[in-house]
Amino acid sequence: MNIVGELQKAVAQAAGVDISVVYFEHPQDLEHGDYATNIAMALAKERRVNPKELAEEIAAKIKLSFLSKVSVAGPGFINFTFSRDFYTQSLKVISSLGRLWGSNTSRVDTKIIIEYVNANAFKQLHIGHLMGISIGEALSRLLEFSGAEVKRESYGGDVGPHVAKALYGLRELKKELTPEVIGEAYAYGAKEYEENDSAKKEIDALNKAIYLGEDKELMKEHSAGKDISMKAVSDILDVFGTKLDRFIFESESAPIGMKIVEEGIKKGVFVESDGAIVYEGEKKGLHTRVFRTKQGTPTYEAKELGLETIKDAWWEHDQSIILTGKEQIEYFKVVKEALAEIHPEQAKKITHLSNGLMKLSEGKMASRMGNIITAKSLIEDLVEKVRKQSPDDATAQQVAVGAIKYSILKQQAGGDIVFDVEKSLSTEGDSGPYLQYALVRARKLLADSTKDDADAVTPESVYDLEKILYRFPEVVEFAQGRYEPHHVTQYLTEVAAMFNRFYAQEKILGGEYEGYKLLLVAAVATTLENGLWILGIPAPERM
RNA sequence: GCUCCCGUAGUUCAAUGGAUAGAACAAAGGUGUUCUAAGCCUUUGAUGUAGGUUCGAUUCCUGCCGGGAGCACCA
């Protein structure tokens, strides 16, 4: 039974308006009740009446069994408060749904490919990648919580100048092949490329040779380096709880992209300009971009066209979500328009989402550690810091990962995140460990309890916790609709804060209403478990 | 120059057009036989600026100021 729907119907009838114009919101202050509507204020002007009087009039007509109170407040809000029984029933619903609590079926039978990680071969993941990984994973799970079937995919470069530089460096350095050495080799190659003419020629030759793939010795080195660097990526993904279904590389998308460009030229989608093949975005209010260089090599844009064809061949899907840094927003608009003229059915499926940049706030940090902080080193630093407080290594890692993910997922994905290494390493207050700790406490209470909650006596008053727990599914749905996991983070923080307050104020085991409180604690635990699952934040057994 | 995004406490972030703009960190003070103090409780503190739309604007529109990103053969 849809409570909000019934409420909406009753209000619409009482006000004499169509149901579609009646909106509800949760009042900010719990004292104001569970739901509020502004219908009286909206109607007051056209009916030329006083909003508060109209509100009183409407309120008086509403009689529903699940409401304990209907009142008018402020400039003309009508506030609705549920009866005691509603909250008690909610707790029972939560406990019976368990793992499914908060989920919905709005996207059942929908197949979605989501592209995020974006790991390049021959490069290490840096802290910026952690943003994409954390947000992408949370989005994937959020969508799975709406019944969608989701495949996770990473698209990255394994050809191009950066690879040639790294391979050149590896040949010169002659060290044992490790992810760190590859990083060192790249830096060496990049430097030589700038400063040494013969090195530059050699690297350019390597670049072409890699594209051609005919030099067997070189390709052996290429695949060894690719394997080692991708293994390091997989290790980080394991720690971060992401299991990809597929890696796609530019070496696969490039040839297909080139064919699509040819196709586009025939259709008149692309034109030649200054020797290059371009798409004139101006006709769509955008800008011109190059798809094929005058040397005849594909640009990133062309490769992107090929990527969607690879996805189609891989798995028949309804939506293709691509998460990238926000600097690609304008670029994606152009690619999508171009694709729409060649393969409109593919373009329609694309949803491009972006995350901001990860910046370091402390100049001193940047200079101390070089300009990039690798994902690995950040995780290691945090684990080390947290290790002393933690019961074991595994927990320390869970806490560290939770802290990093929380700091990314607490805010809207589009904006830049100023990553203050000192503060982000903090595990106090508003943080991943705060949520984890609340869950550990709740689980401990449940484990230590001996009481059977079947004979629970219901207290007369309603705990604040009960007033927000039932909202979890709405929060999930809201977050799903907007692709914004941070709403879940914010909500869970509120639940955890209320639970910690409850824990400090009330004696639970052996206290008054013990059975009922345990039911409530179980509902909190279920909500935190499911919410943390969505965010991809691990839930330690103890802390 | 053109296009897009963003300006909220000292700092990092919230706020489907609504009620007294929420947190956390930082600062100051409290809290230990009730279950884990990674907790809890107090106090101080903010919507860049000028207009407009609206019963009501942090939110929508316009100008200005300030910051960021993109704008042809990189990805």
Image (cartoon, coloured by chain):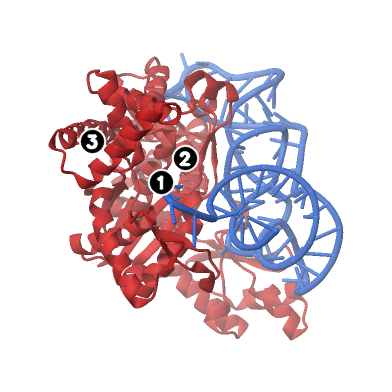
Q: Is residue A103 above or below residue A237?
A: below
Helix, strand or loop at label 2? It is helix
Helix, strand or loop at label 1? It is helix
Residue type at tag 2: Ile
Residue type at tag 3: Lys
Quick one: label 3, few (<14), some, or many (20+) residues within 10 Å? some
Same chain check for tags 2 and 1:
yes
Same chain check for tags 2 and 3:
yes
Quarter of the picture holding the C terminus of chain A: top left
Left/right placement of residue A529 relative to residue A66 reads: left
Q: CA distance from mark 2 to mark 1?
A: 8 Å
Left/right placement of residue A89 relative to residue A46 reads: left
The chain in red: A
In the rendered structure, the residue with mark 1 lies on which chain? Answer: A
Q: Is residue A325 above or below residue A272?
A: above
Quick one: label 1, few (<14), some, or many (20+) residues within 10 Å? many
Label 2, on which residue? A408
- Tell whether label 3 touches label 2 (CB within 8 Å): no
Label 1, on which residue? A135
N-term-proximal mark, 2 vs 1: 1
Circle 2 or circle 3, nearest the eye: 3
Q: Is residue A41 above or below residue B57?
A: below
